Image (tube, rainbow, N blue to C red):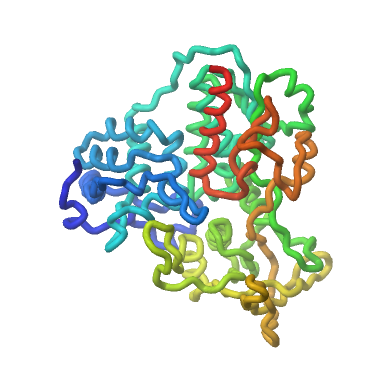
Amino acid sequence: MGKPTGFMEYKRLDKKELDVLKRIENFNDFHIPFDLDTQRQQASRCMNCGIPFCQSAMKINNRNVGCPLSNLIPEWNHLIYLGLYEEAYKRLEKTAPFPEFTGHVCPALCEACCSCSINGDAVGVKANELFLISEAFENGWIKPKKDIKRNGKKVCIIGSGPSGLSCAKQLNYAGFDVTVYEKEDRFGGLLMYGIPNMKIDKKIVERRINLLKDEGIKFINNTKIGKDISMDEINKMYDEIVFACGTSQPRPLAVENNNLEGILFAVDFLKQTTKNLLNKENFIFNLKDKSVIIIGGGDTANDCCGTAAREKAKSITELEITKEPPKENTVPWPNYPNKKKTDYGVLEANTLMGKDIRRYETTIDSVVGEDGHIKGVYIKKVEFVSENGRMVIKDVPNTKEYLDCDYLIIAMGFLGTSDSDAESYGLDHNRNRITLDNFKYSDKISVCGDMKNGQSLVVIALKDGIDCANQIIKKYE
């Protein structure tokens, strides 16, 4: 199977990207697809390993290794190489509910444990996946499934993010009448409002939602359960209830004056920016010619950097409390690499600022305001030291520094479900976590996705939604 010498004949290629200064003029996707010959060559690099770790879906030291969905990667790589694109797509759809989502936003755990990466560069699995789903939509291979035999059971899914959508799709195909409730005006959860448009175009999300509607799933927006509809009503209307509400409680900035105007949680900033963009409105949080500081070093902080670059901020600084990662990977295959990387948003901000915007082992010491609005911050260096067998963070003396700041964007992750949300849903909780037995809260109520696991990856949320649905399906067999 596959071209036996493909990985020796062809180097890994990544998609070309538009020039940074050109692409930050808008919020469009900036990647340039391969031509067909190049795509086939890249697929031919797959070695067809005896044990394909890329689809292993296992954990090492409690960290995910390989594709959580167990995608049949070597099989559809081989079919791409042969030019059998529709057959390749059919293998992909066996395990991947929404390849267009993971093809855009997944960090590609599969590539990290590709056998080619032991002594070279991994196969471009993510690019191959996105190619297949794009071909499928363009060529009409994807059609709504209409011949679903209904079982008379009604399911309510609260939340239309990745886990909610995958759970809804799985239950719908099994014959349940599914209704998805969303508190926002548009469906998709973080896919719609938590991830910027240049990373995943919202038309792609809307296209999938419309397909799910055509397959019989009902979607109701602008509806907050526990407020617009009581839980008593929901209990009377449905046989099963699934909460897939994500993590609604962002980690706060623990300093005084943290409620000044201009201090924003990243989730609020990104959501409002996308809303303004889709509604063709002026940005409420307009960063043009402003001094912007972003706290955090993950994917969300990176997205904030890219957004700030597109809004032409005067200055962009990213503060990361962690140590600067090493230039070379320090963890063994097949673990996800631990090394410094510069993702698209940081690259764009670096280019615009003419320097690396990241400052490591640095955090906020205090905030300075004027007339109710943030004016600046004092930052400080910190260090990690071992005390009584555990690592603690300590301030480095005499390292305070003042920076002008018009907008301070907090991208430090999420704690879990907010107390107010849990209470409105009538769910018992402790420290932002719902008490569960696997997916089950009660015989009738299930919880999946980030609301169950804490902040995680889109691909893991998709798998969680499928597993939650399968547990409900088994109950009625």
Closest to the observer: 226 or 343? 226
Closest to the observer: 62 or 46? 62
Q: Tell me where residue 22 sits by quadrant.
A: bottom left
In the image, residue 10 lies at what x, y percent? 20, 56
Is residue 280 visible in the rendered image? The answer is no
Residue at 24%, 44% (x, y): give it. 36
Q: Is residue 40 left or right of residue 262?
A: left
In the image, residue 84 lies at what x, y percent? 23, 34
Residue at 54%, 38% (x, y): give it. 464
In the image, residue 118 lies at what x, y percent? 30, 60
Farthest residue toward the bottom?
398
Q: Is residue 431 left or right of residue 140?
A: right
Is residue 15 visible in the rendered image? The answer is yes
Quadrant for the N terminus in the image: top left
Position of residue 193 relative to residue 446, above or below, is: below
Position of residue 70 relative to residue 370, above or below, is: above
Number of numbered discs: 0
In the image, residue 288 lies at what x, y percent? 61, 63
Q: Is residue 467 left or right of residue 388?
A: left
Q: Tell me where residue 323 sits by quadrant.
A: bottom right
Q: Tell me where residue 156 sits by quadrant.
A: top right
Farthest residue toward the front?
388
Residue at 18%, 57% (x, y): give it. 8
